[in-house]
Image (tube, coloured by chain):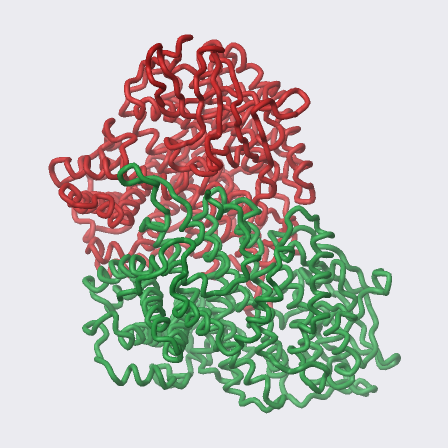
Chain colours: A green, B red
Amino acid sequence: MAAQTDPTGPGQLDDTTTLDGLRAALDGRWQATRDELRAALNRRDLLPDPSLDLSASRAKILAEMTELAAADFAAAGFRADHGGTGDVGTAITGIEMLGYADLSLMVKSGVQWGLFGGAIENLGTERHHRRYVADIINLDLLGSFGMTETGHGSNVQALETTATYDPATQEFVIASTTPLARKDYIGGAAEHATVSAVFAQLITAGPGEEPRDHGVHCFFVPLRDADGNDLPGVTTSDCGYKGGLRGVDNGRIVFDEARIPAENLLNRYADVAADGTYSSPIEGDNRRFFTMLGTLIRGRVSVGATAGAAARKALTLAVRYALVRRQFDAPDGAQEITIMDYRAHQRKLLPLLAKSYALAFAQNELTAELHDVQSQEPDGVEPHRQRLLESWAAGLKSYGSAHASHTINVCREACGGAGYMAENQLSILRGDIDVFTTFEGDNTVLTQLVGKEMLGMYSDEMRGLSTVGWVRLVAGLVGDVVAEKTAVRQVVQTLLDSSDEDPDKSDLTDRATQVRLLRNREDHLQRTCAQRLRRAADADDPFAVFNDAQDHLLAAATAGIERQVLESFIQAIDECDSKSAAEVLGTVCDLFVYSALEADLSWFLMHRHVSVERAKAIRRGVNQLCADLRPQARTLVEAFGIPEELLVAPMLEQG
Amino acid sequence: MAAQTDPTGPGQLDDTTTLDGLRAALDGRWQATRDELRAALNRRDLLPDPSLDLSASRAKILAEMTELAAADFAAAGFRADHGGTGDVGTAITGIEMLGYADLSLMVKSGVQWGLFGGAIENLGTERHHRRYVADIINLDLLGSFGMTETGHGSNVQALETTATYDPATQEFVIASTTPLARKDYIGGAAEHATVSAVFAQLITAGPGEEPRDHGVHCFFVPLRDADGNDLPGVTTSDCGYKGGLRGVDNGRIVFDEARIPAENLLNRYADVAADGTYSSPIEGDNRRFFTMLGTLIRGRVSVGATAGAAARKALTLAVRYALVRRQFDAPDGAQEITIMDYRAHQRKLLPLLAKSYALAFAQNELTAELHDVQSQEPDGVEPHRQRLLESWAAGLKSYGSAHASHTINVCREACGGAGYMAENQLSILRGDIDVFTTFEGDNTVLTQLVGKEMLGMYSDEMRGLSTVGWVRLVAGLVGDVVAEKTAVRQVVQTLLDSSDEDPDKSDLTDRATQVRLLRNREDHLQRTCAQRLRRAADADDPFAVFNDAQDHLLAAATAGIERQVLESFIQAIDECDSKSAAEVLGTVCDLFVYSALEADLSWFLMHRHVSVERAKAIRRGVNQLCADLRPQARTLVEAFGIPEELLVAPMLEQG
């Protein structure tokens, strides 16, 4: 558990070897991209300006995006044969780095290039790519992502906007069929977007058929003319002020029989012939819909990644402040004590710092996997791998954004009144990050999705099932042990093979013991949850059985996510080239594990996975590890490598 | 555990008897004040307008305060012989009710009438009362509360502003002696305040003496002339944008030898003669300082009370939304399910609702005690009672504002994207409440204060001791059991006398068992904390001993606060006139207790205060109680009686 002794003063960073090693480990595979953006973003004019009103804030962000576009920031996100450079990892890493400057810039860029651009790229076909991709990259075409409606955000299969094919004119007629069918919170819809990728129920009839709803599809729908006026059948409005993200022009769209040419159907996964005949290479509305959604995963990955960046920035500010701020308890009448020296303060910040490290490694792995999967030939991806990727993206987005929201809040409070002043950035960050737990999937819904996938063994047939259908499926699975779903990675297998089997007897600082504790919790929760759900097989009200186990399912999912995060951390330590950095990472990993165990200690005790004595050792261990890492606090945040000009905060000048 | 069946639909409230009974219980002793303000504040123009810039927001709040002043809102806060009507309970209740409208209005009113007015009222003497109180009430004199400095917020005894007496001119010279001595975050200092109650080290010398620092005293210091220009020696500036509270003009003040007449010393507790001789009826700088601070307790009580109001408003909005919002899981193709029916959603909101009830009762008791204490002849208060009052105020402010901050955050997330829109109020509330955990005492510092007072047995001599001094004092206390510090109230004593002694064997729904569990935790934590601190008696580094026990001390304090909150709840049930309301309150109290036990379950398990079986029963109990209270959710929030016009939120119109 011993930490390196070293840079202790607020300004001193003597041990550059360790620092470099940590940064290399954190930067991961796209270190070059990170370094480029560190240089490009090192400008304090990129920070949010709270004195600007809505319109000026939005204009500032758009101007910054225009600069990014001029520097070819967005090309990486599109395939070479569409006009991009085809480097998914660079695209995600770039979006993530924007989070160090201004979350509005990240979100609006993410909407334009990730969500809207991603819909065209992944759901469109050659005719769309040829016409739009270059303009999307260079911002000649500003778009929006028209999925969420006032009435439906989580249950997007139930969207109420319709796109009805009219064979007479070979057009689709887009309609908001109810007040709740209004598109809502759509980034870009208030002001800048001239078009939208609109998700709507596709209704058509082949010759002699009754019109049928084929489920949700995506359409390229023009919203505004060149002067910014709404087009016929389109009424946009402004969501106005929000809890943050002032630079993003969220708006609403109501469609009253807006007509678009048939070719505006993004038709990679389905098409409608001139006569109205519907065709698709994918059978089943559910399977088709989830295949389409699966291609749009990049947005969710970007949100998780950026949440991580925001948390790291907040921690950097709060740790720097804690190292210069002094209050109370001057020994021998000398200077007061830096607040970083109080145990309560260490306990506030350092476990969150450790978790931020863990998440950074997990997120890097996710980005790399997304890159590898999406760099393959389209449609060449093995379905199980795609399912695991989607589940992992959902899990990390949920776990990571919850962490970010909590961490930024703690950091704000840890900086007292100064933390509340906009000039010190934390309160702006707090307002901006807030919705990260909601957009790209509500965290509770996403965590539940992860749980459902785990218990449903990622079976293809469960997709799109109602909860009751899913419960019946799980209830019907044989055996009472949920099978291992992901291959155990080599470094973890080696660990497990080399150590004692009984996690309550072996040394808690032993990495294999730590893994085993988290694995056993996950297995236990999944198995017992499955047992409970099995009762639904012959229950009168299967939904009630599900609902009764909902908290259990969420806990099982979170346990699985946390175990995977730990394994990413272990992998990163294994791959770390610097001996001194690896040593520090080991201590940070210990703190991550001890804190995770402490946060769920009642579970481990109730299910006798740890003894009372061990539980007490875990609490003491958190304290000891905080003390051990205290001298490294400065190095640990500097390793994030956040551009210095983006860390401007008058509170850090404590005289 | 059975709850009443009743109003289930979002719009139905059939059981007005229960509703009235609950409201009467929640309203407490100042129900008439609440009803008056319900009528007066039922105006949606009082809600914050996020489209206003800083200056317009501040002007709006000042105009609203002017209206309040015209309606004689503030007179209750001042004694009749000073020109007020002398009703402390009404004053606090009034401030709290403003929180339903706009927290900026509450804070700026609190600064003017509570903090600044309170300093004049409580630290001044007849010459100040006569000249200023009427003008403070009617807003002809706008003031500020100049305590916090850039360098010192928690450790106010170490303030660096000085007030040096100059016998030649019979003036005090006010100086910011270092950059960190700048007054910071001062409400009113940016724009509206023309004067400030400035806290500064009083330095004077009697004839033939060396100048001596007599500790922090309060001075009436003019800041601006009639045109709003800074007076000589005064430089004000603007803190600009914050995380919220846009209607409050927080600013900074630097003093460069500003001169004020000697009579501007608020001289109730100390005076300086014309020749510079210092005198005080209270011996000892520490005792005097803490006596002065003790008279200013009303601000802290108001902040806790208002935090409670803000949490109740957020819960009302989120529960109403959960009752109309539907998503997923339509049984038999019917309407989707209201999100209030999901266990995960119930678990998010209902335990917080139960805790809000508990806090409302505790806060009412605190307000009443403050009223009774401050309605006595000044200086006639029994010191031990005053100490308990101060400690209770610190504890409830900390516990209550942490609850409010967390609750509003959960409510925002529980309303998804809609919750993030300013028009639905929650995100504004979130930004505004954020600093409630910081101002009027940082929560960690306050909780520690409560712990120190408990372990120091509220002894007078411990006040103002350094941590090391305090540790030595505690270490020297005899016996290893911390004595009972507060008299057990009758209703609790009766409960305890009438039930089984072993809390692990008796029924967990038994109120006495619940009390005993919380009391035993508190006693255990205090005793063991005292034992650890006793090691400091002969330690080389007593601060290290303290720091090593800091988390333990904080836990002990929180346990004590939570136990007292429960006992307030029990008292309120006992005093509830309505049988049906009392029955519902009983279930709500159960949920409060079960949730509190669940939140700290690892402690109860580790220290064998509950068995594993009982721990599992507690988890199941939370779920069951949530389900039991689900039909009452609407009634429970309506009982808060928040003016309907202040609950405007478009998200509640779900078609």
Q: How many marks?
A: 0
Quadrant location of residue A559? Answer: bottom left
In the displayed structure, would residue B63 be above or below residue A499? above
Instruction: Indicate the position of residue A287 as horizontal and vertical percent values.
Output: 60, 83
Answer left or right for A263 relative to A589: right
**Image quadrant in which you'd find residue B284:** top left
In percent of width and height, residue A239 lies at 69, 54
Residue A332 located left or right of residue B573: left
Q: Is residue A212 visible?
A: yes
Q: Position of residue A399 (x, y in %)?
A: 46, 66
Quick check: B249 above or below A630? above
Front-lying residue, A506 or B44: A506
**Relative depth, front residue between B209 and A252:** B209
* Point 50% across, 28% down: residue: B145
Q: Position of residue B86 (x, y in %)?
A: 47, 17
The foreground one among A251 and B645 is: A251
- In this view, the residue farthest toward the left is B479
The furthest residue to the right: A168
Residue A451 visible to an observer of this rendering: no
Which corner quadrant of the image does residue A267 belong to? bottom right
Q: Is residue B643 above or below residue A508?
A: above
Residue closest to the eye, A463 or A487: A487
Horizontal side, residue A238 vs residue A361: left or right? right
The residue under the point 43% across, 19% down is B122
Q: Quadrant of the N terminus of chain A?
A: bottom left
